[in-house]
Every structure is written in structure tokens, then in C-alpha cells.
Amino acid sequence: MAPSLHKSRWLSLQGLIAALLGGFLCLAPAPALAIAASGLPDTPPQERILDTADVLSRAAIGELSKTLESFSTDRVDAHLITVNRLDYGISLSQLGAKVLERWSETGDPQQLLFLIDSQTNSAAVVASPDLNGQLDSSLLRSTARTTMAQPIREGGRYRQGSLDAMNRLLTVLEGGDDPGEPATAEVVTQPSNIPTKEETASSNAFTWIVVLLVLGTLVPMLTWWVFSR
């Protein structure tokens, strides 16, 4: 075959590989950008929810926005932020603290922020220092780790977790008793057909395995010996 024909086919193969790689790169989803405090608004936004992770439906955003608006009765400016990836070296609580520090300078001094990280299914609740007398750190931590995060971890119920957390803090701000953490579902162990250690030790399965291994080794050897004579 002529060298020019070889070269032509090789160039065609290179072009095909390049085209396939280009198509694959175009179809591959772009990596999610990390969220830092600098990537969020400098002042409290008019909308109550910043769903940057896109985990809430339009109906959920409407319902949660109305609940967040209810905090205004107690002169609290409340917002919900969802993220799908945090900037390296920063926790969800630290992100909220930085945002509130910046927002408190230009907005209402009583700021309350609910945060969700959809990548780790974790939550945080952060409040400005002016709310420490009404919403102490232990209440905020409990609300985030149990009331809010538990429904999120159990099937990604972002709307339900956020709504439960908001209603719990609203109750406290309005002078009611803290409803407390949600009841933890009791884990029921299902019957298993996997033998226990004691059952395995008392069975003769190991003996049968050894016998089968021995037979599997001796039978081929004996067969070879008989037919090779």
C-alpha cells in the first residue's frame, strides 16, 4: 500500500478521535462553582431566598418566602441561602457569619440566616449578635443539626427541613416554648439470613468446603494419570 494512503488514513483517524473528544467535552456537565461570601450579594436582597443550588421548586420558594416574611413581625430580617459547593476551607456556619457581618452594616441589625449545603446535605442557622438574647447559640445549633438537617438527610426534603426550622424559631421569638428537636425515627432491625459468628462456628460448612477443594484437586490429577498410561 502506498505511503500516502497510509498517511491519509492516519490523518482521518486522528480527525475522528479529535471530533469524538470534542463532542464528549461539550456534552460533559460543567463543574459546579464553589460559593464564597464574596459571591453573594453585598446587601440583604429583596427576595427572601437565594436558591443557588437549585433544590427548591417554585411552590416551595413561595411558601418558604412567606414564612420568612413572618419574621418581620418581630423585626427580624430572615433569609434562606442554598449552595451546592463551598469554597475550600470554609464551613457553612462561617459562610453565614461572613454574609451576616456584611449585611448588618447596610441592613437591619437583626439578621437571621438559614443555610443549606446540598452537596453534604448539611444545614446551618446563623443570627446577628443583636438576636443573642432571644436565639442563643445552642438553640441555633440544635435547630440546624436536627430540626433542619434531619429531613434533608432523609430523602432530600429541603422544603420540609427549612419550614420546620423556621417555625421552631418563630415560636421562640413570639414568646412560646421551644418545640424542641424532632423525634428520631426508631430503627427496626430486619431479620437477616446471614448467619451469625456463633452459627458459622457451629456449622459444618467449613468441612464441606475443604472436602470439595480436595476433590477438585485430586479428581483432575487421577483423570490425567489414568488416561496418560
Image (tube, grey):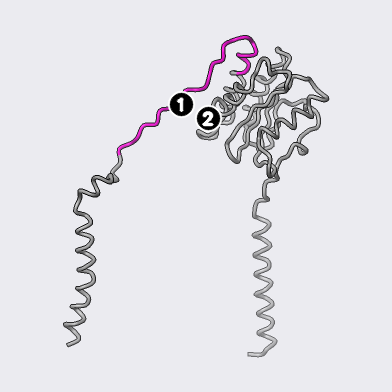
Q: Is residue 220 left or right of residue 138?
A: left
How would you classify the magenta stretch by its main secondary structure? loop
Q: Earlier in the sequence, mark 1 or mark 2?
A: 2
Residue ID at (57%, 11%): 177
Q: Nearer the viewer, residue 81 or 62?
A: 81
In the rendered structure, are the residues bearing label 1 and label 2 in contact, judged by CB atoms less than 8 Å apart? yes
x%, y% of residue 143? 58, 24
The residue tagged with tag 1: helix, strand or loop?
loop
Amino acid residing under circle 1: Thr
What residue does disc 2 label? 150
x%, y% of residue 55? 62, 35
Amino acid residing under circle 2: Gln
Residue 216 image-quadrant placement: bottom left
Query: Counting other residues with Cα less than 10 Å from the Cα at mark 1, is it few (<14), some (14-19), or many (20 or more)?
Result: few
- Spot the residue most to the bottom: 2
Q: Which residues are magenta?
A: 169-191
What residue does disc 1 label? 184
Query: Counting other residues with Cα less than 10 Å from the Cα at mark 2, is it few (<14), some (14-19), or many (20 or more)?
Result: many
